[in-house]
Image (spheres, rainbow, N blue to C red):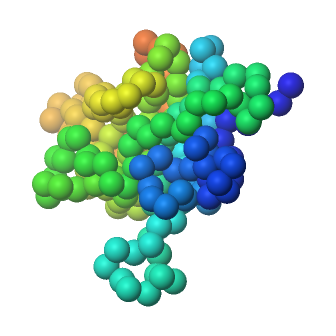
Amino acid sequence: ELVTGASLLGAVPEFSDLFAVPGVDPATKFDVFPGAPAITDAGVIAFKGNYTVDDPTSEDPEVTIGKTGVFYRPVEEAYAGGDAAIELVANSDTLVPNPGACPPGTTFGSTAPPSAAGGYMVFVGFDDEGDPTCGGVYRAPLDQPAVLTTLVGLETKVPGQGSETFTELGEGLSYDGRLVGFWGAWGEQTKTVR
């Protein structure tokens, strides 16, 4: 049977305890769930979610800010996927744990859909998706508090490439509970391949 892992019903009172964006007041719905979710053998769904909040610097209620983050929720074969609420791992208000070349206090400007296994989630996050200065690949427990561990950062040396560090890390990755596979690039040279 199909069960609901996450939903756009976060602002509906009957469902906000389950599906609202965690830590946002008033109860706020997700706008979209980009990319593919991951599900663990223990029935925990991990996913990326985007949402919108009022701009705290504006008095105009029509002025909003788009936010992004990675979340998880234990699901079971029950009404609405069970009684567990969605939990936050990291979002646009979370400090980048390895600021590298970014100024202190830099938060995630982008996150990517996670992979999950063995009680942990692995995801990619940057200060700026289009032109990242800091960020990397992170692991966090599917439990609270969700403490981030940096696995690979933009300041990490590329194996076998001397002092070269990663300049790009792809959003797609795979994690089996022990090993993580990811795409990375370094250097300034480019080549067109057809």
Query: Looking at the image, is 80 positioned above or below residue 65?
Result: above
Residue ID at (69%, 49%): 14
- Residue 58 locus on image (x, y percent): 36, 83
The residue lying furthest to the right in this view is 1
Task: Name the side, left or right, on which 56 lies relative to 46.
Answer: left
- Residue 174 locus on image (x, y percent): 52, 26
Counting every numbered tag in the picture gives 0
Task: Name the side, left or right, on which 99 lies relative to 122.
Answer: left
Residue 106 seen in this snapshot: yes
Taking depth in this image into account, of 17 and 163 the one nearest to the observer is 17
The residue lying furthest to the front in this view is 14
Residue ID at (39%, 75%): 55
Q: What is the quadrant of residue 76 in the picture? A: top right
Residue ID at (77%, 31%): 79
Task: Name the side, left or right, on which 30 lies relative to 147.
Answer: right
Residue 188 seen in this snapshot: no
- Residue 107 locus on image (x, y percent): 28, 54
Residue ID at (35%, 31%): 146
Taking depth in this image into account, of 186 and 86 the one nearest to the observer is 86
- Residue 3 locus on image (x, y percent): 77, 31
Q: Quadrant of the N terminus?
A: top right
Query: Looking at the image, is 52 positioned above or below residue 70?
Result: below
